[in-house]
Image (spheres, rainbow, N blue to C red):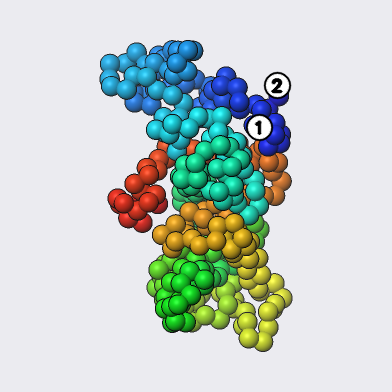
Amino acid sequence: MEAPKTLIEAVQYFSDAENCRQFMIAVRWADGIVKCPICQSEKVTYLEKAKVYRCYGKHPKQKFSLKVGTVFEDSPIGLEKWLPASWLLSNCKNGISSYELSKAIGVTQKSAWFMLHRIRLAMKEDHGDLTLGGHWQNPVEVDETFIGGKAVNKHLGERRQKERKTIVMGMLDRESRQIRAKVIPNVKRETLQAEILSHIGFNAYVFTDGHVGYDKLSEYKNFTHKTVNHINEYVNGRVHTQGIENFWSLLKRGLNGTYVAVEPFHMDSYVDEQVFRYNNRKGKTDAQRFTKLLSQVAGKRLTYAEVTGKVGGAEAF
Ligand SMILES: [Zn+2]
């Protein structure tokens, strides 16, 4: 059977354990050779009956599945469910709720909720030292938005509602159409500008609204800073922030329609999810988006205690 192109094909294809195995090898090791997660040795054999590998190195945990060393590690749920779940989250425009996922693949809602959080961890992009905009004077739109707070606690006054809102900051490189976004603690000048300095390269054109927190940006990194005043002009030639604002509406649609009440503690992972789909939406098929996601599952882990905030706090994300 050929590699799947649709969700239905993916469900059929990954119902076969051998297909799951071949697929995991292909996305995890460029040379196609399975390596022991403990000692990196290539001297391993596949035990077909138990569907695990065995390393000949002298160390504990000689037997391992291909889930070890990925976000799927230690999960009793098989790849025949993990892979279609990953397909769904990488391709459903507004995301998928734990309720919908539990019905779709036949796991409890609690398991589905945990699965979605693990998949979102894989969606989180690692930029390394790469900056946006720089060197070619590309425009980068920068903006921040307030999310949540409504309908969570109707009896709280307007002021308390505001306190429950989460602030998300985003930057869009208009040439590459790539977005970066994250939760920030406040909109103070030092917070906003520290983010801009670490994510945007020299010589970039930085477009923001007139928020005082963006004042004097042109003093740094040879930036050209242009602002658009939202009170009486929405678009000032090419100086505007409509791209990042479109992303905010996508993000809010997913959060309001699919996920309803998101705890501020989990907001970053929902932002990562939406950023992944946004950055991979153009020029990629569903299968390519799914494969991209699976290429990011290795080297990351998320335990249930971390996702429920019982250890490590927000740092765990
Ligand atoms: Zn080993």
What SS does tag 2 mark?
A: loop
Residue found at x 59% / y 56%? 258
> Which corner quadrant of the image does residue 21 belong to?
top right
Task: Residue 142 in the image: state x and y as whole percent.
Answer: 56, 68
On screen, 72 above or below 23?
below
Give the number of the disc on residue 197: none
Task: Residue 158 in the image: state x and y as whole percent.
Answer: 47, 82
The residue carrying mark 1 is: 10
Residue found at x 70% / y 34%? 8
The residue carrying mark 2 is: 1
> Is the residue marked by circle 2 packed among few (<14), some (14-19), or many (20+) residues within 10 Å?
few
Identify the amino acid type marked 1.
Ala
Q: Nearer the viewer, residue 272 or 259?
A: 259
Residue extending farthest to the left is 59
Task: Residue 303 in the image: state x and y as whole percent.
Answer: 37, 42
Chain-order first, disc 1 or disc 2: 2
Q: CA gap, disc 1 to disc 2? A: 11 Å
Residue found at x 66% / y 52%? 93
Task: Residue 185 in the image: state x and y as whole percent.
Answer: 40, 68
Quarter of the image that includes the N terminus: top right
> Is the residue marked by circle 1 packed among few (<14), some (14-19), or many (20+) residues within 10 Å?
some
Q: Nearer the viewer, residue 259 or 201?
A: 259
Question: Could you tell me if residue 61 is visible in this image?
Answer: yes
On screen, 271 above or below 218?
above
